[in-house]
């Protein structure tokens, strides 16, 4: 999500970008061709750094964030930020910020309204979901997952995670075991399985002690044998990697 040492777009470039976005939205509503507009937008995006930038209040030394258009999305009330969002995607997403040594989450609409109290050791967004990697309780080697309000989705036992890029499934690992988090529903399947396997046209297969099965939307493990023998098993109720 971070930049590659590119120059910031000028005010004129930002103005042209905004106008092109407006034109594209109008053409999309009218079901007109937008190829030329998309091409020009791509030309504008490639050579510039469109990420929000920090600014400092000279009176307090506190930091805030503003977009490349100059809009303040986070007031200068904080000490540090984990990430900066992109103007070409959504620059007003909630922001994880540090204040007085503790991390929380605030709105990205300029208000600075607190969504998650400043009580964590570290917070970082798991983009593009409304989920956050977090550390707390002095734990340095592992992390957990929280939602926008700071409610714990997964305890701080994790060693790693990876976004499968399919159906909002996030793979998680701890102590050599595997699990998943559904990025849409926030269902957490704790890492207690030996292996998991995805298929673009099938359910996610979970393996434990030599037994294979699936996970329902309630987090229940159902063996393949149970699924095949139970006529009441509904395919819609199992975690899968099919396109939404």
Image (cartoon, rainbow, N blue to C red):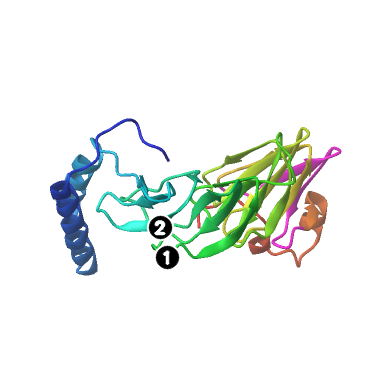
* Residue 111 tag number: 1
Q: Residues within 10 Å of mark 2 (few under 14, many from 20)?
A: many
Q: Secondary structure at mark 1?
A: loop
* Residue 133 x/y as whole percent: 61, 46
Disc 1 to disc 2: CB gap under 8 Å: yes
Residue 55 in view: yes
> Does the magenta run of residues contain 125?
no
Q: Which residue is mark 2?
A: 75
Residue drawn at the location 79% of the way across and 54% of the way down: 221
- In the foreground, 43 or 139: 139
Res 130 visible: no
Could you tell whether 79 is left or right of 6 in the image? right
Residue in view at x 44 percent, y 49 percent = 62
Among the two numbered marks 1 and 2 on one chain, the one whose residue lies closer to the N terminus:
2
Q: Does 155 appear above or below 71?
A: above
User: The magenta stretch spans which residues?
Assistant: 201-219
Is residue 207 found inside the magenta-colored segment of the image? yes
Cα separation between marks 1 and 2: 7 Å
In the foreground, 53 or 229: 53
Up the image or down, 182 lies above or below 114; here it is above
Q: Quadrant of residue 160?
A: top right
Name the disc covering residue 166, or none.
none
Q: SS class of the residue under badge 2?
A: strand
**Label 1 crowding class (10 Å Cα cut-off): few <14, some 14-19, many 20+?**
few
- Residue 52 lies, in percent from the top left, at 35, 47
């Amino acid at each position: 999500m971070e930049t590659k040492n590119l120059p910031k777009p000028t005010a004129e470039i930002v103005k042209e970008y905004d106008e092109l976005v407006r034109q594209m939205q109008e053409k999309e509503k009218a079901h007109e061709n937008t190829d030329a507009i998309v091409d020009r937008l791509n030309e504008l995006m490639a050579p510039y750094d469109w990420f929000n930038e920090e600014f400092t209040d000279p009176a307090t030394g506190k930091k805030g964030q503003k977009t490349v258009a100059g809009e303040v999305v986070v007031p200068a009330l904080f000490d540090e930020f984990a990430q900066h969002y992109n103007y070409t995607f959504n620059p007003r997403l909630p922001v994880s910020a540090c204040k007085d040594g503790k991390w929380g989450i605030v709105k990205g609409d300029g208000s600075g309204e607190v969504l998650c109290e400043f009580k964590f050791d570290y917070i970082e967004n798991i983009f593009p979901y409304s989920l956050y990697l977090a550390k707390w309780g002095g734990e340095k080697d592992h992390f957990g997952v929280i939602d926008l309000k700071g409610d714990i989705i997964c305890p701080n036992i994790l060693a790693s995670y990876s976004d499968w890029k399919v159906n909002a499934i996030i793979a998680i690992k701890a102590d050599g075991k595997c699990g998943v988090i559904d990025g849409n529903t926030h269902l957490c399947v704790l890492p207690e399985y030996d292996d998991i396997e995805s298929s673009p046209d099938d359910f996610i297969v979970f393996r434990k002690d030599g037994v294979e099965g699936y996970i329902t939307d309630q987090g229940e493990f159902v063996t393949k044998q149970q699924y095949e023998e139970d006529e009441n098993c509904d395919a819609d109720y199992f975690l899968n990697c099919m396109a939404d």
